[in-house]
Amino acid sequence: MRAMDAKDEFSMLMRAGILGSVAACVISTPLDVARRSMQAAIAARKTPPSLREALSAASKQGVTGGLFRGFVPSVLHSALSPALWLVVYHSQKGHREAVEAAAVARAVQVVALQPLEFVRVCRQGGLLLSVGASAHLERGLGEMIMSDGAGSFWRALVPTMLRDVTASVAFWQCYITLQASVGPGLGEGSALHSAGLASASALLAAVATQPLDVAKTRMQVNQLMRSGEDGYKKVKQARFIATLRETWTAGGVRGLWTGGTARASRAVFAGLLLGPLFQFGHVVAEDAVKPLRRALVLPPDPANTIVHPRSRRSMFIEVK
C-alpha cells in the first residue's frame, strides 16, 4: 500500500508539474521574447532597448510573429522539463542529500533540453535586429545542422548550466530557509504562504544570475559561420568570458542586467502561480529534513551489531 501511495504521489506531481509549467510558459512567453530580443540587441554606443520598446515592437508584428514567436519550442521545453527533472531526482534522492540530488537532476535536465533552449532563443532573439543581422536566426533546423553542425545546438551550455543550476540551488536553499524561519502565525502550510515563499525565492535567484542569462543569450544568437571578403567561410565562436567582457564594454552594468525586469517578473509570477510546485520547491524542502537512506549491512548474528551510545545521526531503516 505504501508503494502504491508513492506511485500515486509521483504521478500526481508529474501531471501537476507539467500543467503548471506549460501554463506559466503560455502566459509569460511575451516577457521571454522581450527579454531575449533586448539582450541580443545590445551594441556599442547604443542605449540598451527598454522592456517597453521590446514589447511594443513585438506587438506590432502580431501574435505568432511577435509576442509568441518561438512558442512551439518553448512549450515543448516547458512540458519536458518537470518530467525529466522528477525522473532523475527520484533516482538520485535515495543516496544523495535532497538539494544535491535536485541539483544533479537540474544539470541533467539542462544538458538534455539544451537543443530546445537554443532553438527558442534563436526564434525569439531576432525581434529588434535588422533583417540582415537576424537572417541566420530564422533558418530552418535542417539548414542550421548542415551549416553549423548538430553540436551547435548545445552552444552556450556552460553559461546555461551555471545560470540554471546556480539559480535553482539558490531558490531551494532560500525556500527552505524562509520556510523554516517564517512562523505559523503567517499562515504556514497554506497555498498563499507557499506561493509567497516561492515568489520571493525565485526573485532573488533570478536577479543574482541575470548576467549569466545575458551571456547565454548573446552566445546563442551569435552567427557562427560568416563569409569573409576573400569568399571563404570563417567560424566565429562566442566564448563565455569574452562575451561577458564585450557586453560590459558595450553596456556596462546596465548591459549585464538587460532583461532583468522581464526575467524577475516572470520568476515572481511563476512563483505565485505554481507556489510549492515551482521547481518542486516543496518536494525538495520536505525531503531535505528526512534522514538520508544508507545501507546497513548486518552480520549473520544481528545481536552483534553495536551502535555508539552517543551517536546522533538520524537513520532511515527499511525492513524488506
Image (cartoon, grey):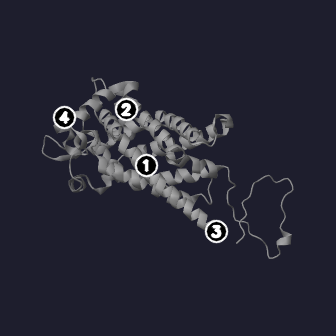
Instruction: State yes or no: discs 4 and 3 in contact (Cβ < 8 Å).
Output: no
Residue type at numbered disc 1: Ser
Q: Is residue 239 visible?
A: no
Residue type at numbered disc 2: Gly
Q: Nearer the viewer, mark 4 or mark 2?
A: 2
Residue annotated with mark 4: 130
Disc on res. 1? 3
Which of marks 2 and 4 precedes in the sequence? 4
Q: Which residue is at a point 47% across and 52% down the rendered structure image?
A: 17
Q: CA distance from mark 3 to mark 2?
A: 49 Å
Outermost residue toward the bottom?
300
Residue annotated with mark 2: 259
Which of marks 3 and 4 precedes in the sequence? 3
Q: CA distance from mark 3 to mark 1?
A: 30 Å
Q: CA distance from mark 4 to mark 2?
A: 19 Å
Is 241 placed left or right of 311 in the picture? Answer: left
Q: Residues within 10 Å of mark 3 (few under 14, many from 20)?
A: few
Residue annotated with mark 1: 21
Tag 3, which secondary structure? loop
Tag 2, which secondary structure? loop
